[in-house]
């Protein structure tokens, strides 16, 4: 092999010319450490101080060294490498699509997926994630429920590669793949305003859920951009289940001055809101964030802010496998776009038109 080394052992050269595929021995030579030290860093074992680990990681990056995960696991008697997937609820069609897509990508890379559900509980998320790490998964894909993910990096032995999807991580810098939540929600509410609505309700998840925070922000931006007040009596958070969303919508429609339109934060909120609207036979416009099964087959097809869950899952999985293959770039944030799909429910005009065209006042 032809490698240019620094004049003093242990100095990492600014340029390294590699003719053949580098080995762990090459990394040790460039970093000026023992082969065992490199092995400990590569395998995320304890016993290496941060300064030395940084030197080894720098050498790995300059040499573009990549560990053969499949061969490594075969030597350990493991027939298939594993990654862990932590999601909210597999019963939700959104997460079912995410899981299926990740399984397909993992299979192409020679990995199997071990799935666990957090149930939107931060403590449960930490418990199942720690369990996956103890099982020896080589990487993690996490839909976060908690607000502090420093536990993933408590010590070097737990520094498994992790990519967060649907929501960003909290208090750590890590890769994430998320939706364009604020813009998508703003466009959905602007669509209702453009059809004459002034009292628009928001039905969403608990306020500690990042997607709820961002979509509620898009809702508020749309109202303010049109010169409309934000009536907090029309904002109902804390409805992650269909039954809770239905109950909140019934309460909204029973107000003395009820909303003429409803914006639902996700597919579960949408189903609950539409059940209430149908049960009360209410003439209410509706836009939901997330498409859902049979939305286009309803008596009044549902207008939604759509996106492709498979695209998000695929991007997150490929980002993780790139990290496992040696990608040393700084943490990446990939934003998946959304689009408004007008089908009918969002185009219902208010029962008593106000005679004002708010669409001219929308922010472009």
Image (cartoon, rainbow, N blue to C red):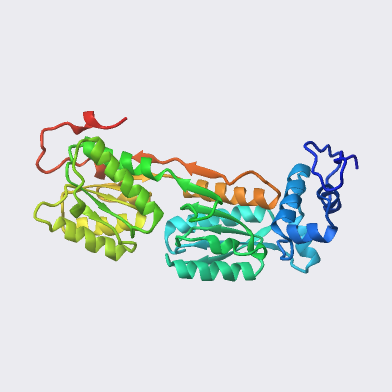
Look at 48% across and 59% down and name the residue there: 144
Q: Position of residue 27 (x, y in %)?
A: 82, 50
Q: Position of residue 348 (x, y in %)?
A: 20, 42
Q: Position of residue 77 (x, y in %)?
A: 78, 69
Q: Nearer the viewer, residue 139 or 289?
A: 139
Look at 32% across and 46% down and name the residue there: 217
Using the rendered image of the protein, determine whether residue 337 is visible from the camera's viewpoint: yes
In the image, residue 229 sits, relative to residue 84, either above or below, namely above
Q: Quadrant of residue 356?
A: top left
| In this rendering, position of residue 204 left or right of residue 153 | left
Using the rendered image of the protein, determine whether residue 279 is visible from the camera's viewpoint: no
Q: Nearer the viewer, residue 150 or 364?
A: 150
Q: Position of residue 87 (x, y in %)?
A: 49, 61
Look at 33% across and 58% down and name the residue there: 207
Q: Quadrant of residue 254?
A: bottom left
Q: Nearer the viewer, residue 98 or 21?
A: 21
Look at 83% across and 37% down and name the residue there: 17
State which quarter of the image contains the C terminus: top left
| In this rendering, position of residue 281 left or right of residue 86 | left
| In this rendering, position of residue 57 left or right of residue 293 | right
Counting every numbered tag in the picture gives 0
State which quarter of the image contains the N terminus: top right
Q: Nearer the viewer, residue 206 or 99?
A: 206
In the image, residue 70 sits, relative to residue 263, either above or below, namely below
| In this rendering, position of residue 49 left or right of residue 127 | right
């Amino acid at each position: 092999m032809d490698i240019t080394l620094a004049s003093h052992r242990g100095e990492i050269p600014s340029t390294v010319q590699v003719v053949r595929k580098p080995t762990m021995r090459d990394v040790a030579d460039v970093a000026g450490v023992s082969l065992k030290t490199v092995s400990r860093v590569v395998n995320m074992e304890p016993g290496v101080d941060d300064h030395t680990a940084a030197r080894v990681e720098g050498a790995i990056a300059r040499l573009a060294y990549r560990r053969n995960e499949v061969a490594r696991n075969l030597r350990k008697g493991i027939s298939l490498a594993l990654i862990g997937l932590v999601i909210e609820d597999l019963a939700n069609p959104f997460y079912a699509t995410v899981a299926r897509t990740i399984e397909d990508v993992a299979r192409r890379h020679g990995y199997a997926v071990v799935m666990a559900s957090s149930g939107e509980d931060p403590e449960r998320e930490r418990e199942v994630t720690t369990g996956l790490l103890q099982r020896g998964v080589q990487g993690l894909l996490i839909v976060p429920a908690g607000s502090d993910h420093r536990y993933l990096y408590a010590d070097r032995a737990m520094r498994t590669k992790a990519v967060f999807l649907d929501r960003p991580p909290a208090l750590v810098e890590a890769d994430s793949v998320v939706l364009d939540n604020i813009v998508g929600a703003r466009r959905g509410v602007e669509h209702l305003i453009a059809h004459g609505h002034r009292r628009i309700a928001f039905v969403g998840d608990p306020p500690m859920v990042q997607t709820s925070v961002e979509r509620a922000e898009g809702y508020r931006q749309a109202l303010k951009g049109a010169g409309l007040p934000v009536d907090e009596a029309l904002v109902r958070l804390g409805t992650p289940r269909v039954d809770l969303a239905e109950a909140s919508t019934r309460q909204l429609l029973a107000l003395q001055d009820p909303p003429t339109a409803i914006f639902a934060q996700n597919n579960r909120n949408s189903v609950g809101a539409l059940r209430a609207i149908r049960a009360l036979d209410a003439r209410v416009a509706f836009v939901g964030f997330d498409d859902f099964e049979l939305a286009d087959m309803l008596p009044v097809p549902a207008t939604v802010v759509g996106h492709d869950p498979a695209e998000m899952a695929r991007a997150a999985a490929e980002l993780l496998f790139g990290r496992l293959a040696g990608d040393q770039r700084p943490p990446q944030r990939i934003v998946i776009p959304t689009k408004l799909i007008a089908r009918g429910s969002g185009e219902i005009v208010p029962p008593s038109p106000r005679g004002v065209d708010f669409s001219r006042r929308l922010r472009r």
